[in-house]
Amino acid sequence: MPSRLVTPTCHSDDVRYGITVPFDGVSLTSHVKWFAELAELGYTDVWSAEVDGTDGFTPLAMAALAAPSLHLGIAIAPAFTRGPALLAQTAGALAEAAPGRFALGIGASSDVIVEQWNGISYDRPYHRVRDTLRFLRAALAGEKVTETYETFSVRGFRMSRPPETPPPLYLAALRSGMLRLAGREADGAILNWLSAEDVRTAVTEVARGAAKGAGAGGAGGPGPDIVTRIFVVPDPDPASARAIARRLIAAYLNVPAYAEFHRWLGRGPELEGMWGAWAAGDRRGALAAIPDQVVDDLVVHGSPEACRAHVDRYVANGVTVPVLLVVPGQVDLAEAVRGLAPAGGAAGD
């Protein structure tokens, strides 16, 4: 099976090519076949998430057995919704099931998920993520942890079966503080909802953190990984693809954290119309206010060839693991996955 990206443009040999699972409308049991075929198609990674569907670990546990060549990652597990020890145990179990192939992404998540859905105070998210990272680093290495962190304390915890290969730890990051923390103390950063050109801005902040810290770059290694989830609508009809993309943008970029992220990136003037209409309850007006250029920058769309070329731009600007989130729209999901793949093959039904 191919283990590298084989699209013949601007790729480092170290770049992998991922896709987001589970797929909407496909049962978890049906994913067993899909995982094997994704590997045949040339995808090297499958990455899950925890929002309001499946948990992030169960699909990866299935993939670990169904496709032993795939790299596995979660982007992300919230730092709040599991206790520190349980998060370490869950990550350790998956690292044992897929030795050397699993990466744990953690992040602050959101007040909706943490407070409104899980009844947990969303307090000092930056510090909670930092403390969780530091705890996980020690716990997954098999150390006994007795420590009072700023946001929680642990007394006498030691994993009875730490993984032989501790998983790399990535941080979901938007603006400078978390991006620099990812470079300083983590093995990489997880990016989301940014353009190919925006990647340069984010990577610069990660590198600044790495230059000062003990993370992947600060330890003299090859530098932190940059994992990026990329929304892809493989529809060659621009009007149809942009209509889907506008709904995605409105759903995400009206969340305060993402709104501030895009103000930080300098996209505020282009999005003020959407934000104003959304705040006024005018959903249709908010969609109409999103400029085509913003749509084309933030959501990859078009023919499969055009989509792959657009993903190449993310890689050229510093992404080491592009992770496609495929929104097929009017295109059959299997056809979309096949068309976007970096190598030939047949996708599952």
Image: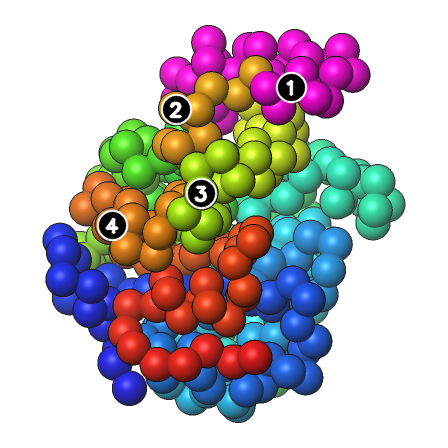
Q: Which residue is mark 1?
A: 286
Residue at mark 4 to residue at mark 1: CA–CA distance: 29 Å
In the image, residue 260 above or below residue 339: above
- Residue at x-position 32% and y-position 31%: 198
Residue type, numbered disc 1:
Ala
Mark toward the start of the polypeptide (1 vs 3): 3
Mark toward the start of the polypeptide (4 vs 2): 2
Mark toward the start of the polypeptide (4 vs 1): 1
Q: Which residue is mark 2?
A: 293
Crowding at mark 1 (Cα within 10 Å: few <14, some 14-19, many 20+): many
In this orientation, which residue lies closer to the viewer: 150 or 211?
Answer: 211
Please check the rendered image and state whether residue 278 is part of the magenta-colored stretch, yes or no: yes
Task: Give the magenta-colored segment's residue range.
Answer: 261-288
Q: Which residue is mark 4?
A: 309
Residue type, numbered disc 2:
Gln
In the picture, the quarter occupied by the C terminus is: bottom right
Q: Position of residue 13 (x, y in %)?
A: 15, 66
In this orientation, which residue lies closer to the viewer: 83 or 36?
Answer: 36
